[in-house]
Image (cartoon, rainbow, N blue to C red):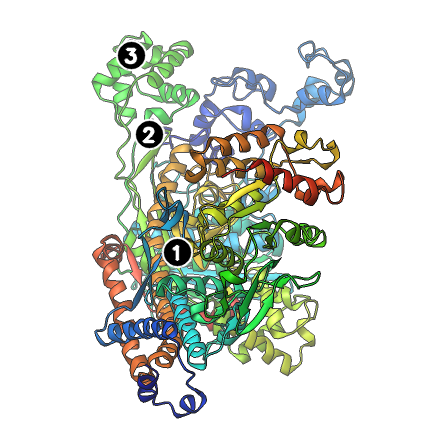
């Protein structure tokens, strides 16, 4: 493949620059689809046809829940993007730009962030005052388009998102050849990289001494658990995703669950947002439905906080946060999702929250005692096997 | 004696005509007036004097007559004797107050002493005092009215005689606030003995007694203009008229004897002068300084008057331009006081169809009029009376009316008293009568409107619509609308020298003012943009401009998109006469404001005039145009008229919409190509970077696809049907004219004409 590329490239300067990095088999596959995309344009142009690409649509209407696999899957509908359509011409041009940018990354064997890609491709269109991109968000959506278009994952395109989320626990993993002992991370923890594919991170069942994974919603709660060395006491891995977990965290959890057979428990806020984080971890997200297969963990469990915890834990009124109109709407929407619709426990849970008309954050447990959550709440739930599925 | 018969149906409605005739020196009219007019609107002072003979109570003192005049209910009459007490506020209760039991009054004057003061008022005396009623309220308007009356008379005369009119208008300054107006036509001329009467006697004319479409109506205008001239300058009115090439011309210098409303001939020992035809005559004309453009026949009137010459809205220039638009069959030569000559060539070689005279329609008649008509009628049956007096009344209908009124069809008109007349009047309203024949109206016609507009208004798109005739209150009328769109504003043709001249001439205090006043249709928005573009201060005076700044201004004027802030210009006409004042109270303006122009591709703020380089002319032709006031400035808002106006405006609006949309489409198409072209390069680069194909080859290929695609898009639009059909329809439409704006003669003519718009 690389040879063919060099042979075909008549641009001497580009050739000199392109230190053709060794392509992994996965890179070769990605390269083929990128070149296929470009060849499609050439073929259309030769036939005097309108070049177009069919991008699988990433909308709520194009996803469906598979009860058998218990994950969200992407449907078959696509959006046609044409060069010779006034409203799409610019988007088409951007798609091609992103494809060429990814090709450059592949051949040079380098990776870049989404923002890096944005700067790589941003320039003023010749003869105009118009920029190819004005905002990073414009570039990000096109990158997602290219991912689904080429059915390549972001990491396969040599792109990564910002790192977010950390982990500690009784596990030693191999990150790009370095041994990382997650039980010796001090107070900081191991930052979960954006790309956690087997090429980068290798997991070894023999080097894992954990019985389960506890995923918490955000850094502050995670900090509490880490400081109390919860993971040491309970032999677990402790992760957080700084709110809605990024792909790296989700993929890591997925691998821990599937390769090391560790059950995943979540401690999230008792609000619609927390429910949705759980939903994404469990079934996959709408926007990245094409990745559910390698991200969603249908067996993931919801440990807390529960709507009934206000009474159960005897919390004071001061920790209540009233629901706003948006929360109520969102809660009803979540209750209506097909993967929640038939679960009586979940329906009761959401109904209870709506009845309460307030939400609870995990931090609210601190009002009882600083370590209440690590020493009493979570151990009790685990002991009682009191969770939602 | 059928004197009052042919009076216009709407007669009483429009006091303008009514009261002028009230004062008529002509006793024939007086009868009618006294019988028919409602005294309510009558100006209080004048009626007293009239030598009314056969009106009941007519000759008596005003108080008595008011009460007795048939058809009068006297409720609102402004009688000074009545008004005084109430204004003094002495009487709390009006009903209790009677003029007779007014003690103070008696002490001051007695009926006898008052009777001694009561006497006739001559029409001319009245109008000399109330000249504003005839459009002589200020010097500026006086000049316009004089030109207007003379030109209207000339046009009417030529058309009646079947001659294609050619008019010379010459305005010359003779003193600091004095102007001499000369108007000559190639009409049939006037026979010798009529000349002094026509020009030297108010209310002497041929058009008053006929119900038909004409410009003038009551025979008051030109003699009033002459009277105004004599009063303000002391110079007599000079008339020279020639009936045929071989016949002598008649030359008169006259002035009105205001006391008696009689002409006074000053030259030729009160007999006027006959100038023989041929070279001898030419010598005489030259020797005596008589103004005359040699013609086989025609009339020239010269009036010197105190006035002020201005340009811009409501000016003589404006009036002549507008007249030329609505009368494409005339040729006009105009010399302004600065010596600039402008010709309005003839764009149609055919006279408009001669309007027909009609009988009044029963629906348009009022009770007072009906009584008057009955009174005058010869001894005949009511049925005969109805069928012969009115249009559209067949014997069957007459029978029906009589039946409803419970009057025998065979009853003599002599026996019809007030009560019966009232019953008859009510019966007429209750009976269904066909609308009057409408073929009595002679519209300008769509083709000629297009020609007229094209000749005078610069533009690239012209449309016209003539509505079928309709009827309001028993009077047939017809609406015509013409529209001109686009073209470049006059200012964009201005040369540097012209601009410098204009700046020298102007008396505007700031440049902004100068721009707005000098160039028609240039809004304040556009002026501000020009100033911004030229970098000049808003408050800078035009006279202090340096040559370099003038150049900057010129560049800005050419560069700024003026049409952005332009608003629609409306030209209003009634029976081919331009209406130049009181636009706000006119039905035409109101209807234009009430029409939604946004759907026709113009922008329009709520309740405002539409914006854009548009000129709309609206012509209301009728045997009786309902003006809102005596000065013939605005048309009254009858629902029927407004409806027709709206339909006509919509008809041209739709065509404009098609054109504007098409222009937009063409523009979009090229924009589209532009957008594709912009991105093609990027796509080609990206693709060649990926699979290393030849970039330029790919680009060329994509380019050709782009061209094909955008062309395809056109075709697609066509196939979908509507848009393309519309365009073809538009081009085939006889009522639409599309021209290349740069090739339009007016667009070039406009530049030398620009100074005429200076205010």
> Residue B487 at x, y = what percent?
41, 66
> Is residue A46 visible in the rendered structure shown here?
yes
The residues bearing labels 2 and 3 have C-alpha atoms spaced at a distance of: 19 Å
Return the residue at label 2: B360
Label 2: which secondary element? loop
Label 3: chain letter: B
Label 1: which secondary element? helix
Label 2: chain letter: B
> Residue A126 at x, y = what percent?
45, 79
Which labelled disc corresponds to residue B402? 3
> Residue B627 at x, y = what percent?
47, 38
Check if mark 1 and mark 3 are on a common chain: no
The residues bearing labels 1 and 3 have C-alpha atoms spaced at a distance of: 92 Å
Which labelled disc corresponds to residue A290? 1
Of callouts 2 and 3, the N-terminal one: 2
The residues bearing labels 1 and 2 have C-alpha atoms spaced at a distance of: 86 Å
Residue B163, compared with residue A202, is above or below; it is above
Residue B272, compared with residue B670, is above or below; it is above
Picture residue at 44% right of the left edge, 46% below the top: A298
Q: Depth check: give the residue in front, B210 or A298.
A: A298
1 or 2: mark nearer the eye: 1
Label 1: chain letter: A
Q: Depth check: give the residue in front, B651 or A120.
A: A120
**Left or right: where B161 falls relative to B176:** left
Q: How many marks?
A: 3
Residue B130, compared with residue B416, is above or below; it is below
- Examine the image and state in which quarter residue A188 appears: bottom right
> Residue B681 at x, y = what percent?
38, 78
Q: Which residue is the extreme one toward the front?
A: A206
């Amino acid at each position: 493949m690389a040879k063919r590329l060099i042979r075909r490239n008549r641009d001497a300067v580009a050739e000199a620059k392109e230190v053709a990095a060794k392509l992994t088999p996965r890179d070769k596959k990605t390269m083929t689809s990128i070149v296929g995309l470009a060849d499609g344009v050439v073929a259309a142009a030769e036939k005097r046809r309108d070049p177009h690409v069919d991008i699988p649509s990433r909308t709520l209407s194009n996803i469906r829940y598979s009860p058998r696999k218990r994950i969200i899957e992407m449907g078959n509908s696509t959006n046609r993007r044409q060069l010779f359509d006034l409203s799409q011409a610019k988007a088409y041009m951007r798609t091609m730009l992103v494809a060429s940018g990814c090709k450059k990354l592949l051949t040079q064997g380098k990776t870049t962030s989404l923002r890096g890609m944005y700067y790589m491709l941003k320039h003023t269109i010749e003869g105009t005052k118009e920029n190819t991109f004005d905002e990073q968000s414009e570039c990000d959506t096109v990158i997602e388009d290219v991912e689904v278009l080429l059915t390549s994952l972001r990491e396969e395109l040599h792109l990564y998102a910002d790192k977010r989320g950390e982990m500690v626990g009784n596990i030693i993993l191999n990150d790009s050849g370095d041994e990382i002992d997650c039980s010796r991370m001090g107070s900081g923890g191991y930052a979960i990289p954006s790309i956690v594919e087997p090429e980068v991170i290798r997991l070894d069942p023999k080097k894992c001494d954990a019985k389960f994974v506890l995923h918490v919603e955000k850094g502050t709660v995670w900090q509490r658990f880490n400081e109390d060395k919860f993971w040491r006491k309970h032999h677990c891995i402790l992760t957080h995703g700084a709110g809605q977990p990024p792909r790296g965290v989700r993929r890591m959890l997925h691998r821990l669950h599937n390769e090391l057979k560790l059950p995943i428990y979540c401690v999230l806020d008792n609000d619609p947002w927390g429910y949705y984080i759980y939903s994404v971890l469990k079934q996959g997200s709408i926007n990245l439905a094409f990745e559910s297969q390698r991200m969603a963990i249908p067996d993931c469990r919801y440990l807390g906080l529960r709507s009934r915890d206000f009474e159960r834990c005897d919390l004071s009124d001061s920790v209540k946060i009233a629901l706003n109109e948006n929360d109520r709407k969102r809660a009803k929407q979540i209750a209506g999702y097909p993967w929640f619709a038939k679960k009586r426990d979940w329906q009761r849970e959401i109904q209870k929250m709506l009845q309460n008309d307030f939400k609870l954050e995990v931090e609210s447990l601190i009002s009882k005692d600083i370590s209440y959550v690590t020493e009493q709440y979570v151990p009790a739930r685990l002991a009682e096997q009191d969770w939602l599925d | 004696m059928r004197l009052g018969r042919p009076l216009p149906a709407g007669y009483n409605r429009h006091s303008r005509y009514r009261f002028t005739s009230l004062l008529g020196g002509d006793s024939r009219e007086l009868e009618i007036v006294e019988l028919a007019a409602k005294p309510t609107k009558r100006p209080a002072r004048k009626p007293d004097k009239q030598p009314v003979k056969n009106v009941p109570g007519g000759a008596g003192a005003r108080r008595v007559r008011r009460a007795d005049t048939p058809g009068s209910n006297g409720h609102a009459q402004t009688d000074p004797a009545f008004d005084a007490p109430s204004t003094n506020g002495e009487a709390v209760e009006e009903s209790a107050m009677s003029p007779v039991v007014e003690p103070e009054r008696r002490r001051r004057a007695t009926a006898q002493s008052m009777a001694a003061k009561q006497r006739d008022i001559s029409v001319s005396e009245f109008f000399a005092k109330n000249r504003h009623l005839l459009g002589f309220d200020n010097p500026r308007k006086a000049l316009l009215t004089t030109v207007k009356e003379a030109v209207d008379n000339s046009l009417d005369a030529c058309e009646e005689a079947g001659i294609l009119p050619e008019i010379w208008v010459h305005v010359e300054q003779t003193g600091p606030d004095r102007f001499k107006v000369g108007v000559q036509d190639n009409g049939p001329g006037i026979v010798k003995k009529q000349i002094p009467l026509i020009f030297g006697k108010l209310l002497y004319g041929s058009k008053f007694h006929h119900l038909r479409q004409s410009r003038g109506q009551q025979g008051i205008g030109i003699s009033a203009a002459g009277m105004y001239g004599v009063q303000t300058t002391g110079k007599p009115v000079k008339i020279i008229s020639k009936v045929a090439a071989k016949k002598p011309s008649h030359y008169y210098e006259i002035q009105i004897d205001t006391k008696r409303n009689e002409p006074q001939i000053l030259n030729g020992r009160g007999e006027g002068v006959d100038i023989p035809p041929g070279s001898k005559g030419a010598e005489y004309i030259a020797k005596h300084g008589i103004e005359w453009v040699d013609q086989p026949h025609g009339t020239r009137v010269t009036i010197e008057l105190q006035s002020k010459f201005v340009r811009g809205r409501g000016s003589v220039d404006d009036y002549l331009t507008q007249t030329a638009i609505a009368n494409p069959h005339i040729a006009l030569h105009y010399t302004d006081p600065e010596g600039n000559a402008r010709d309005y060539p003839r764009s149609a070689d055919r006279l408009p169809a001669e309007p027909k005279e009609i009988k009044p329609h029963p629906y348009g008649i009022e009770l007072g009029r009906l009584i008057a008509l009955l009174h005058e009628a010869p001894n005949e049956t009511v049925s005969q009376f109805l069928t012969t007096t009115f249009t559209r009344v067949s014997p069957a209908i007459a029978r029906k009316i009589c039946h409803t009124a419970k009057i025998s069809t065979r009853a003599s008109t002599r026996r019809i008293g007030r009560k019966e007349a009232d019953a008859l009047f009510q019966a007429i309203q209750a009976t269904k009568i066909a609308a009057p024949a409408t073929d009595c109206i002679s519209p300008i016609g769509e083709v000629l409107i297009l020609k007229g507009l094209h000749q005078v208004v610069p533009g690239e798109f012209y449309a016209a619509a003539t509505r079928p005739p309709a009827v309001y209150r028993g009077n047939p009328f017809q609406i015509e609308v013409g529209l001109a769109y686009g073209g470049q504003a006059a200012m964009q043709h201005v040369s540097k020298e012209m601009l410098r001249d204009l700046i020298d001439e102007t008396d505007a205090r700031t440049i902004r003012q100068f721009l707005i006043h000098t160039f028609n249709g240039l809004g304040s928005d556009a002026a501000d943009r020009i100033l911004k573009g030229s970098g000049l201060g808003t408050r800078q005076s035009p006279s202090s401009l340096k040559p370099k700044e003038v150049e900057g201004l010129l560049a800005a004027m050419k560069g700024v998109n003026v049409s952005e802030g332009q608003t629609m210009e409306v030209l209003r006409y009634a029976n081919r006469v331009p209406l130049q004042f009181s636009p706000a109270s006119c039905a035409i303006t109101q209807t234009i404001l009430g029409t939604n122009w946004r759907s026709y591709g113009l922008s329009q703020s709520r309740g405002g005039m539409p914006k854009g380089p548009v000129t709309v002319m609206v012509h209301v032709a009728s045997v009786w145009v309902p003006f809102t006031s005596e000065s013939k400035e605005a048309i009254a808002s009858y629902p029927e008229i407004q409806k027709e106006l709206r339909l006509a405006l919509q008809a041209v609006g739709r065509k404009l919409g098609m054109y504007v949309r098409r222009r937009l489409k063409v523009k979009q198409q090229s924009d589209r190509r532009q957008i594709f072209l912009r991105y093609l390069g990027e796509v080609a680069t990206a693709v060649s970077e990926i699979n290393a194909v030849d970039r330029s080859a790919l680009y060329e290929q994509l380019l050709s696809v782009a061209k094909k695609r955008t062309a395809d898009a056109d075709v697609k639009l066509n196939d979908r049907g509507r848009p393309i059909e519309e365009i073809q329809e538009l081009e085939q439409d006889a009522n639409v004219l599309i021209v290349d704006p740069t090739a339009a003669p007016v667009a070039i003519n406009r530049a030398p004409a620009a100074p005429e718009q200076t205010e």
